[in-house]
Image (cartoon, helix red, strand yellow):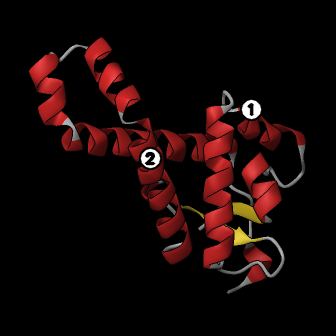
Amino acid sequence: MNNENLELANTRSRALAFVIDDFLITFIVLIMYWDKISVVGNDLETVLVVMNEYVWQILLLKFIYQTLFVWYYGATVGKIITKIKVIDYTHLGRVSIFTSISRSLLRLVSEMFFYVGFVFAFFNDGRQTFHDKIAKTLVVNA
């Protein structure tokens, strides 16, 4: 890997990747629980009730998705589309499975607490979120 050409991903790319990933997860959840949603009704309130009913399964899906994609590809589908990736801060290379697991768990914590952990990216030179800081990762242009 050529470390000389590393450039931090901008906030716009990261936000767009986040939105793409969230839409993808939501789409998968809708497919998984469509039988339950369609029986009760298909309005937004019904979807939210079903999602709240299966919140632990949805969190597990998010965790597995984030962990495996970041570990194996260095990026989620959203990050691949926006051409950014996650690297290890220490050696500027691919993240280990342990790093990917810890980053994914901490990302879920950030989401559960009103996305406060994402705000950290605005206040440090490495644009690191809470989960990036603790897991020692950076998000860079691919």
Query: What is the three-letter code of the residue carrying label 1?
Result: Val
Q: Which residue is mark 1?
A: 116
Left or right: 79, with 48 as reference point:
right
* Circle 2 residue: 21
Residue drawn 78% across and 47% down?
130
122 and 9: which one is in front? 122
Tell whether 45 sits left or right of 133.
Answer: left
Query: Which numbered disc, 2 or 1, marks the residue closer to the eye?
Result: 1
Q: Residues within 10 Å of mark 1 (few under 14, many from 20)?
A: few
Residues at marks 2 and 1, CA–CA distance in whole angstroms: 18 Å
Q: Quadrant of residue 22?
A: top left
Badge 1 element: helix
Residue 31, quarter of picture: top left
At 66% across and 27% down in the image, what residue appears? Answer: 114
Q: Position of residue 6 (x, y in %)?
A: 74, 71
* Image quadrant containing the C terminus: bottom right
Place of residue 119 in the rendered image (x, y in percent of width and height, measured from the top left): 77, 35
Residue at left offset 88%, top offset 39%? 123
As helix, strand or loop, the secondary structure at mark 2 comes to helix
The answer to whether residue 20 is visible is no
Residue positioned most to the bottom = 1
Percent x, y of residue 68: 48, 69
